Image: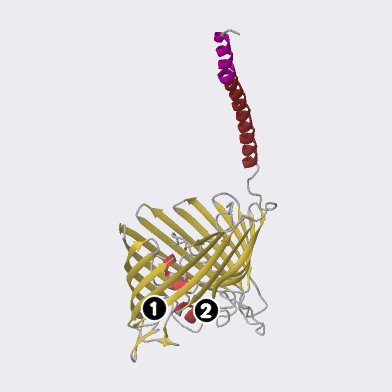
Amino acid sequence: MPVSFKYLSLFVLLYLLPEAYQAQIEDTLTAKKKETSDKTKKTKTSSAPNFTTDPVTSTQIIFRSNDKLQLQGTRIISAIDSILHPVLRIGGYVSTYYAYYDDDSETNNFVLFPTLAPRKDQFSLNMAVISAEYKSSSMRSNITLHYGDVPESSWPATFNLIQEANAGFRLSKKLWFDAGFFKTHIGLESFQPRENIASSMSIPDYYDPYYLSGAKLSYLATSKLTLQASIFNGYNEYIDNNTNKALGFSANYNLSENISLTYNFLTCDETPDAVKTKHQRYYQNFYATFIYDKFTLGIDLNYGVQQHSLLRDTAKAAVTYAGTLVAKYKLHKMLDVYGRLEDFSDPNRILTGSLSIGQYIRGATIGFEIKPQKTAGLSVEWRGLQSDNLIFRQGNKSLNQRNEIIVCLDLWF
């Protein structure tokens, strides 16, 4: 064999054939990658969460409270959870205050109309809160424990430490069932200062229920409209005081992210079973929130009718009504100023019971809040209250007005 032909044969064997074989291997690998990619796409397409059949996946644990809570504390749930993985959110909250009142009227060391900042002329604690919230595509639950002046002044002795404890599951794509102990969904203002614009609670919201025990059906009719039907033991009751039950209906409509409208209806009879004359109550509440740039506005209206409750003629029904207007303006990224007007009328003592306020209680509030971060705030406010009757006291002198100054520090994590 000639030398030139010999070297040419070696070149073909060593270089051309391996290159051809390498190209064949690359073609095979490319085909396999394409096949794997197609399978992955099919898997992703078919892996949408199905809350009725998919197995429970690992739970994500978040040690932090929600950041945006203002004017959200009483709103009914207006969204259906569609998360891929269950989430357990654990948080804490502390609200502490100093309060001054020029009114000497006290019951059990608390001022008249206690709840927020109920102790006069001293530093104290509204509440210390530990909460756990669980959410998945098919189940949800809330557990909130609290301690401080709020539960001591306004909560029942039984279950005094429980602010909220409920659980729920998804019945269908848009329908949820929940049962247990709930925070109120009635009224604009909550009993947690961080969820309000002002640090004190308006008189109209003071007489709304704070807590309810029972069951709810929530239906997401559209992306903007949520409906809720409920049954509870009573009006502001954990333990039932008679054999009657309270029935309720709520509707929340979000015109946009910044405009929300809520209507609540609750009917109940808190008359003891031994009393023959019944006092069925029909209570309606409407509130709206508006946010525009640096300006926030809240409106709250109540109207109630109760049978056999007119003082001058118990065969007739009596009426109670109230309204609150509260607004806030952001002067600086760390500074808000706010104001509130309130009016409450219950001349037949449907809600006030033994306290005779006359025809009305009216109030005005002004204040400011410093927010060094989203989950902390220091507020200073003044409120003046005026009643139709002489329900306040300074020494031995009876008055129809009261001045308050409250400094409140809120921090949640």
Quarter in which the N terminus is drawn? top right
- Secondary structure under badge 2? loop
Question: Which residue is depicted at the point 33% across and 66% down?
Answer: 369
Residue 271 seen in the current view = yes
**Res. 238 image quadrant:** bottom right
Percent x, y of residue 289: 44, 58
| Amino acid at pointer 1 | Ser
**Is 12 contained in the magenta span?**
yes
Percent x, y of residue 75: 51, 61
Q: Residues within 10 Å of mark 2 (few under 14, many from 20)?
A: many
Residue 402 seen in the current view = no
Front residue of 361 and 3: 3
Residue wearing tag 2:
155
Q: Residue furthest top?
A: 2
Q: Earlier in the sequence, mark 2 or mark 1?
A: 2
Tell me how far mark 2 sits from mark 1, CA to CA: 25 Å
Residue wearing tag 1:
387
Give the prevailing secondary structure in the magenta stretch. helix
Boundaries of the magenta span: 3-16
- Secondary structure under badge 1? strand
**Res. 344 image quadrant:** bottom left
Question: Which residue is depicted at the point 55% across and 10% down?
Answer: 3
